[in-house]
Amino acid sequence: MKTGGLLFNLAVAMQVKPGDYVLLLSKDQKTYMIKVTEDGTFGTHMGNLEHNEMIGRGYGEVVNTHMGKPFVILEPTISDRMMKVRRKTQIIYPKDAGFIVLKTGIRPGMRIIECGSGSGAFTIALANAVSPNGKVFAYDRREDFLEICGKNVEENGLADYVEFKVGVAGGGFEETDVDVVMLDLPSPWDGVHASYDALRGGGRIASLSPTYNQVEKTVVSMAEEGFVYIETVELLIRRIMARPGKTRPADRMIGHTGFLTFARKAMIKGDEGFSGI
Amino acid sequence: MKTGGLLFNLAVAMQVKPGDYVLLLSKDQKTYMIKVTEDGTFGTHMGNLEHNEMIGRGYGEVVNTHMGKPFVILEPTISDRMMKVRRKTQIIYPKDAGFIVLKTGIRPGMRIIECGSGSGAFTIALANAVSPNGKVFAYDRREDFLEICGKNVEENGLADYVEFKVGVAGGGFEETDVDVVMLDLPSPWDGVHASYDALRGGGRIASLSPTYNQVEKTVVSMAEEGFVYIETVELLIRRIMARPGKTRPADRMIGHTGFLTFARKAMIKGDEGFSGI
Amino acid sequence: MKTGGLLFNLAVAMQVKPGDYVLLLSKDQKTYMIKVTEDGTFGTHMGNLEHNEMIGRGYGEVVNTHMGKPFVILEPTISDRMMKVRRKTQIIYPKDAGFIVLKTGIRPGMRIIECGSGSGAFTIALANAVSPNGKVFAYDRREDFLEICGKNVEENGLADYVEFKVGVAGGGFEETDVDVVMLDLPSPWDGVHASYDALRGGGRIASLSPTYNQVEKTVVSMAEEGFVYIETVELLIRRIMARPGKTRPADRMIGHTGFLTFARKAMIKGDEGFSGI
Amino acid sequence: MKTGGLLFNLAVAMQVKPGDYVLLLSKDQKTYMIKVTEDGTFGTHMGNLEHNEMIGRGYGEVVNTHMGKPFVILEPTISDRMMKVRRKTQIIYPKDAGFIVLKTGIRPGMRIIECGSGSGAFTIALANAVSPNGKVFAYDRREDFLEICGKNVEENGLADYVEFKVGVAGGGFEETDVDVVMLDLPSPWDGVHASYDALRGGGRIASLSPTYNQVEKTVVSMAEEGFVYIETVELLIRRIMARPGKTRPADRMIGHTGFLTFARKAMIKGDEGFSGI
């Protein structure tokens, strides 16, 4: 059974075994995510860690480098896995990804199109959210991106929940009656018509774009297509340095990742006044 | 089979039937979430809607009030369901909820403790994320809050994934080896020891608090207990009025909901230097 | 001597006398700004205050209403004066005004054009900053706005430093060799050419606009005109509720006032590549 | 007359002469602030600029390096001067400085104490704001900081408006009846009593601190001393990349400089309920 396999790989393993991904934490809060292999060695900024030292150990336990520097063995969360993907593209960050999942109502069992899957950070979050009985259809126009996306999904044990397809948004999607379409494209408006066709009534569309110009063209195109309840937001994340007696926001922060636009498919012809724009 | 029932109620129904919850959208972007009942009537700011008019219709279709004002029938997403709960308490907002879920790595099949479940907005998001084969243990010290939380969860078709328990964090939790503990308490530090005991090695704790003082006491208590990789952030959400030729951020925004603190259980004794504080 | 008069009215008066403006503060942190007149009475939410009770009192002293409710007599600062102007228009807020003054390098003795002076909140800040030997030329296309702007400036004792002119930006300004031009217009690009003509070499232009679209058209027009070093920012202000043991950001905040664009006049023909856009 | 000299040096010079400070701008938006000297040479990332080429030229004109790379000669504004001071300490940024000046109502002719003047960036803004007939009393406990502060003030032509004093806040200030006290100290509460003594009735105090712990201790101490109308804010500045067809907020931003606390001296004994905390 597929689900069982997944749960074993990802969630409830109590002891590290070959093939597992672990997150290693040093005292200076550096983290490494690595795949454990028999007889492997991993070089850190504080010396080498022998994989065999980790195998059979429980999560939360401490292992030492050959220089005697300790690391805690942690289990990578979805957020860790997203941030640690091999990247050939800009990724969607957890702050945005988590909100998109709740806002579009993604849940186990759903069928989702992601167009512009890039390096696959968000594909991992989506596949996790629709498992153990749903599916993500990951489109990208570039085969090299799809390949890296596929590897990232595979390594995170989520390959059963993703189908990869080379294609452009303007060419239409092969699926129909999907629950949600996510667009991460330079020209999201090119994918709006195809998204409308692929979605079931009431289905949700989401789009992420860095510029306000993209947002404006996208919302106009959504309204004309018959999407309603169009909303755009941006999320800012701020790290707080919580330290006894000297707690303060961090000096530097990410100033912008992208604007998020959401809408829903209505069974109407064009903009009948429900778009909100 | 439970899963089947859930999917029918929540995700893939193609036509509205009695007992379903629908989200009604008017042209001025007001929304109502109601339960459809045979022969029911619902009064809006634009006239009455007959439930029988909705039964058998597809999502995305339009119905009219007795005054001829149209509403689109939409399917409530998890975010809608959170925002529309009956409230006796402050709720956790989708912007925070989505990030917590990804950051703590919550996924189908997991066992989660939520302490201070209040009106249950976040309980809905958690139950959705662990379904169809996980469980949320929702604790609150007040029975009246648990009751309203229970009703909200029930009405959203998620009762199979939640167990309700009256109790305070300081009293300890009945569960062990849980994957994640979420604290939404006035004194989160009271729950840190019990959380450590309840979590498996590598398990995650998250805490939401509105004040800096709470955050500071909480992180100190986490570090002393043996939690590592402690991080605190806040998320700000900003609505963008995307309108052709006049796109701008909204005039008003929510200035603060709370600070989010995350950490992981290490198998160590007290603060051995991995806490990051 | 004009300067003397100004200093007397605004800055160093030690005792309240008829004609002075005072800021009255109640325990619940409500403030009123009023002009003190002999035998006057002022109604507050906590009862009436007799003006004669204030006359001859020092700043910082307490007076009581007829119901025995105390108010502290404070001196209005420039920020108070800006926030308390009679308004017929949106005003420029102190957070933006203070930054514009420093960024454009406004100082005593300078000659400034303000186009779109509206209700005059920013005119007050500008007049204060160029006093006691500079001048603000306040343009507005609407006489009714200029009139209210004039009254607000007059009541704040700054009339000697402002000249009012009815006119539109597209029509050109009467002044030349000014140090700074400030545009607060629906179509700031209409005023860019006239601003270039009015400014001396190296002079600064600033523009405030609420929408991205306005900003984009404005910076293009500035670059084409020969302005260089074009920069756009926005400022967000967040109130902090600093209370012993429960310090936190305020629940609500102003989400947006406007984007601020700055540039400087170069003696070049069109965009020679120094604009930065 | 001192004022005349100042205005000549800083504001209205139409042609660059030896001794002037100029801001040099390259096409890639790099800026250098230098003092022009006869026969001087200045090395840039695009080749050397001969000072003699600049002398006699007007602001806004273009000069070329020996490699033929052009720079625009600009006049440094107060904001430029603040950002370009030689630094031995963290500085107060223009976004904060501009707001403090308006909020405390600083104007020409006022007498201001700045305690913790550090490298003098804010001293420059204060001296500019009180000129041509006011005075800033700049205290610092470290002579080496005062020395660099003095040099920075001197080089910006503002020495007539500043007196430098070695001293700590806890030791009291020599001045009385000042209009405003500005504290930039690690322990601002140490300076609250001395500030109360130095201020006239209704005078304003401002304090900048990076941590919320400092803010909390400071507001408590202000309330106990007899300060009223206590307010704390933070200002965030966000750069907008305004570019034709692709306008967006910048990727990175400064996440935090400090919290700003403001209050006013009332002639009361301790906290009589007007503090607002």
Image (cartoon, coloured by chain):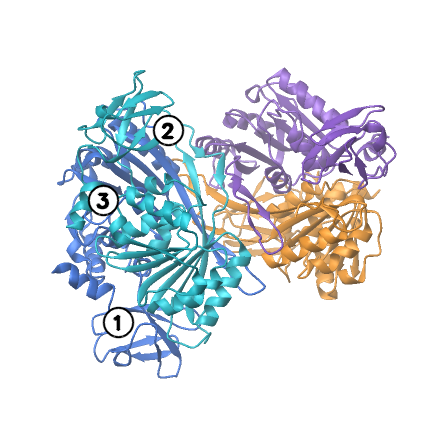
Chain colours: A orange, B purple, C cyan, D blue
Same subunit: marks 1 and 2: no
Q: Is residue B126 visible?
A: no
Instruction: Give the residue drawn at x 27%, y 42%.
Output: D185
Q: Which residue is mark 3?
A: D115
- Going from N to C along the chain, the mark reached first, 1 or 3, is 1
Residue B264 in picture, x, y percent from top left: 57, 38
Secondary structure beneath label 2: loop
- Give the residue displayed 55% in from the left and 33% down from the top: B207
Is D226 in front, or is D193?
D226
- Residue type at mark 1 is Met
Mark 1 near mark 2, Cβ–Cβ under 8 Å? no
Task: Identify the disc placed on residue C30.
Answer: 2
Query: Percent x, y for residue A72?
Result: 56, 43
- Residue C55 shows in this picture: yes
Mark 1 on the same chain as mark 3:
yes
According to the picture, the residue beneath numbered tag 1 turns out to be: D14
Q: Quadrant of residue B135?
A: top right
Numbered mark located on residue D96 in the image:
none
